[in-house]
Structures are given as structure tokens and as C-alpha cells.
Image (spheres, rainbow, N blue to C red):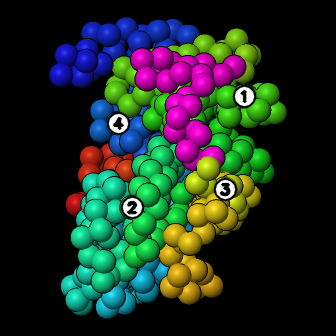
Amino acid sequence: MRYLTEFHDPELAQRLLDTIAATATRRWTLMEVCGGQTHAIIRHGLDQLLSEQIEFIHGPGCPVCVTPLEMIDQALAIAARPEVILCSFGDMLRVPGSASDLFSVRAAGGDVRVVYSPLDAVGIAEANPDREVVFFAVGFETTAPAAAMAAVTARRRRLANFSMLVSHVLVPPAMEAVLGAPDNRVQAFLAAGHVCTVMGTAQYEPLVAAYHVPIVVTGFEPLDLLDGVRQAVEQLEAGRAELVNAYPRAVRAEGNPAALAMLGEIFTVCDRAWRGIGTIAASGWRLAPAWADLDAQTRFGVADLTVAESPLCHSGAVLQGRIRPPDCPAFGTRCTPRHPLGATMVSAEGACAAYYQYRRLAPAGWTP
């Protein structure tokens, strides 16, 4: 609690705001690549406090939001099977597939269980040897080590009834896709600190060099974000482009060597579809060949299942920073947290959910 209070100190926040205002000679465009950072920016009104110096573009930093529609439908198909117990983090249950969601499957009798760790799913498999237990493994580099550990543990315990539906995605390729787009406006990035606690910071150096864009690794509290903005603005004003670790209390340049070694053994890099965005080369992980017996896509024959996105949902444009959530015609009307058209409205880290919850910059006449 002491640290939480310190990183919310209003006097320190005002000093940082004053420094940014005194440094910026023009309005700069920054992208944060983390749904948790997006929520902190909107919740604490940092976008409004910095409106004259900074335009925030909210990037594809919500792992639930970018899980492709076909992967949701694959999970739905697996969960509907009577011999299956499908385990998932809670924020996936209300993410809409093409026609349903996991809550609906559970209401219809499917055995869908919320777990707080992939190892919980391993324990369920051990306790139910007559059932197939599938863990829906989604997330960025942050959650992948726990999924890898679940695979290792299941094999050590010789659990033939455990498998994983893997939809892990990687942040740097998504950042490069944003930078390489012809309509890109991003001039600097705030990189997600929790990803870097696992992966380290070296993966961002090629982006800085190739695109001459500052990247500042930062945390998730108001002062973390304001300090990250300050360091990005100082670089932009000086014409510099450097990789800076502004989150040294959690991030080391080398990352977490033990986690990296496990990830390298269990997963292999692959092309991955991102919901609303499309396929990004080398932007995901799948199970390595030596661990393919744990692949739920193959075990249940759902790998070829593909579906089309709803034309009513503009979440892809939101995830790419092309529009703000309130700019979507369906925002707050046809699309709400209770009746979401896309994952960005239902996810706890989604940009649309952040704007809806904190009522920032809502369209004229809109009421929640």
C-alpha cells in the first residue's frame, strides 16, 4: 500500500505534468501497448490532463481483445463436447464468438470452469481422469510462462487427458505492424512493463533503430505513465530515438532467464491472426513439435474452423489506433458491456470498456 500511495501522489504528478508542459513545443502522438495502461490513462484522466501536449493512441494491448474470432469459436466447439471440461480465465467467458460465448455454452450444460492459474486446470485433469480437460491459453508474453509450466507439470504427472488451446501473441511484431502501416501516426511508444519483466528489453532495439521511434518501458500507475510520457517527450523534442527502461523496479534488460528457457522449450514462433487486424507474421506462439500431443486443436479436430468478423464491430480500427472507442457508431448503443459486439467492450483491459466505464469523451447525447 505504501508503494501504491507513492505512485498516486498528486504533488509529484503535478510536477511531472508541469515538466511535460514546459518541455513540449508541439503536440506529440504516443501509443501505449497495454490494456492495463489504457485503463489507467482513462481512469485517472491523464489523456485530459495532457490533452494539449499528448494525443494518446490506444494500441492492440489487450490479449483478450485480439484473440481471433475463429479461436473463440474453436473453444466453443470444444467446450460443447460432453466429455470435455474447458478451463479458462474469467475474462474470456463473455467474449463473443460468431454466434455465442462460453457463458452461453455453460448455460446450455457445457462444463466450462473459471481458473486463476493454468496449474488449476492441471489439477482438474488429475482429479477427473475420465474427462478431457482443456485449458484455453490466451495472452501476451506475460501469461505464457504459466501456460508453459502447466504443460510441463501435466507431462510430469503423465496426464493423458490434459491439452491446451493455445492463442498466445507477441507484442513487438504488433508494434512493427503499426509502425509499418501507411497511415501510421505513432511518434513514440509506451511499452508494457509486465511483458518486459519476462522478455527483457532487447526485442525493442531493432524497432527503435529501424523506425527511429522512442520506446519507453513503463509501469501502470499514474506516476509511472507520466514519467514515461516525460521521457518520450524529451526524446522527441531533442530529435532522439532511444530505448529507455523507466520501470527498473520490475524490469531487467535480460528479462527472466528461467521463464525464457521454458518458453523456448515449450513453444515455437508462428504467424498468428489478431482479431479485427488480420494475420501478423511471427506474432504468436504455438506448441513446439515435441509438445504437440497437448495441442487441443489437433486432438479435437477444430484447427480448420474459420469465421468472418461482424461488420457492425469496429474493434479492429480501435485496436490499431485508427479511431477512438466513442467514434464507433455502435459504441454505447448497440454495443455495451452487457451486449458486446466485440471483445474490446467486454474485456477488463479493452479500450471500449475503459471509455464506457469511466465515461470519457463520450459522443454527444450518449448516456450509459
How many marks the image carries: the answer is 4
Location of residue 336 by image quarter: bottom left
Q: Are marks 3 and 4 in contact (CB under 8 Å)?
A: no
Looking at the image, which residue is at 43% across and 23% down? Answer: 250
Residue 157, numbered label = 2
Q: From what the image shows, is residue 214 above or below residue 23?
A: below
Question: Sequence-wise, which precedes: disc 2 or disc 1?
Answer: 2
Q: Give the residue number, with chain letter if any, for mark 4.
A: 40
Q: Above or below — where is 101 with respect to 47?
A: below
Furthest residue in direction right, as rendered: 210
Q: Amino acid at mark 3?
A: Thr
CA distance for labels 4 and 2: 41 Å
Do we see residue 270 in this rendering?
Answer: yes
Q: In the drawing, what numbered circle is on residue 29?
A: none
Q: Which residue is at the far left?
A: 1
Tell me whether circle 1 and circle 3 mark residues in contact (CB < 8 Å): no
Numbered mark located on residue 205 in the image: 1
Q: Secondary structure at mark 4?
A: helix
Please provide percent x and percent y for residue 255. Answer: 55, 29
The residue located at (38%, 35%) in the rendering is 41
- In screen coordinates, is 362 left or right of 325? left
The residue indicated by pointer 3 is 268
Spot occupied by residue 292 in the image (x, y as percentages of width and height): 60, 69
Label 4: few (<14), some (14–19) or many (≥20) C-alpha neighbours in 10 Å: some
Q: Nearer the viewer, mark 2 or mark 1?
A: 2
- The amino acid type found where label 4 is placed reads Ala
